[in-house]
Amino acid sequence: MVYNATIVTDKGEYLQLGYLYGYVFDISPLNGITVNLSTSQGVGQIGETVENVSAPGVYRTIRGTALDELAAERLLTALPTFCTGKLSVGGCYCNFVVDKSPMVSRKKNGKYIFSLSLYCPFPYWYTSDESFYILNTYIPRFFYPTTLNAHFFGFKSSEGYTIINTDSTHVPVPYIGTFTSSDSAVNYGIVEMESGKKLMFEDTLNYGETVTFFEEGGRVRATKKLVDGTQTEILGLLSSDSDLLQLVPGTNVIKAFASEGQESLAVSISFHKIKMGVLA
């Protein structure tokens, strides 16, 4: 197969795969997902009843030839055991952890054959382009000329909701939610108005603080950055009925709220759209 791929690890290693970079390779699978089915069958029942359906992670195997010794060495140094990172192909990417570090052997013609395996806990691909939405934000309108002290004028957007289309009809989409306040907001969050699902922090958010909700390596996380720059985990401050951990498939009508100080609350939501597979 003739295509390029890029691997960026959590340690900052940058590996490009492709003929121009010294590799002839193939990645399998690039598409196709096997689901886990849980079924039951009663006495005398013809056929089975599907009780539960889930999609596990995917093992992606990369096999190929390194065209010289330097390219082979780059494989061994870039992807050690316990390594995590992003694999990018065809304008999409997936997060991975190394399942099998590169196995490299020398051929008689001076080239090297290799194979390695990456485990992607999320079975689908993310598009590289990021979608970004804002709620309750301050919108600058104009500013003084540069001959004077910089001073922007603007207004507070009165629209505390936004409509987000994930372009995914079946799969919930992970997102990053960022919360700030121009004063202070109490018991703040967002709600998807059609499904009623919400995300709420039982917390007070003060001016200069930033709360970020996101998914990392398949785990939900929430952090709070204080004015002095220190950062702490606040996942335990999520209300017990918070269930908007991912955007619902299709259209989301998202509204920001707070029990006190809602007018000071500003929220941004960003995400990468999902593709079932990559054609390379």
Image (tube, grey):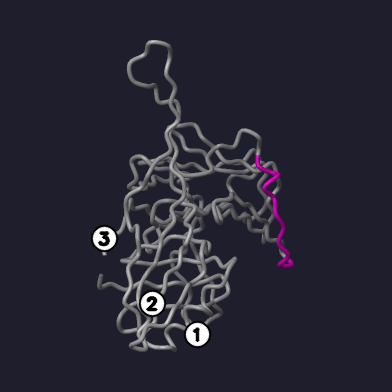
**Residue underneath mark 1:** 147
Decide whether residue 236 is among the magenta residues: yes
Quadrant of the rendering where the N terminus is positioned: bottom left
Name the residue rendered at 30%, 59% in the picture: 278
Q: Residue furthest top?
A: 44
Mark 1 and mark 3: Cα distance apart in space: 54 Å
The quadrant in which residue 52 appears is top left
The magenta segment is 228-238
Q: What's the CA distance linking mark 2 and mark 3?
A: 24 Å
Q: Secondary structure at mark 3?
A: loop
Label placed on residue 113: 2
Q: Are marks 2 and 1 in contact (CB under 8 Å)?
A: no
Residue 5 screen position, x and y as percent: 36, 71
Vertical placement of residue 102 versus 226, above or below: below
User: 273 or 92, which is in the foreground?
Assistant: 92
Closer to us: mark 2 or mark 1? Answer: 2
Q: Earlier in the sequence, mark 1 or mark 3?
A: 1
The circle on residue 114 is none
In the rendered structure, the answer to whether residue 208 lies left or right of residue 138 reads right
* Residue at disc 1, secondary structure: loop
Point out which mark residue 279 bears.
3
Q: Residues within 10 Å of mark 3 (few under 14, many from 20)?
A: few
Of the residues shown, which amino acid type is indicated by label 2? Ile
| Mark before the other along the chain sequence, 2 or 3 | 2
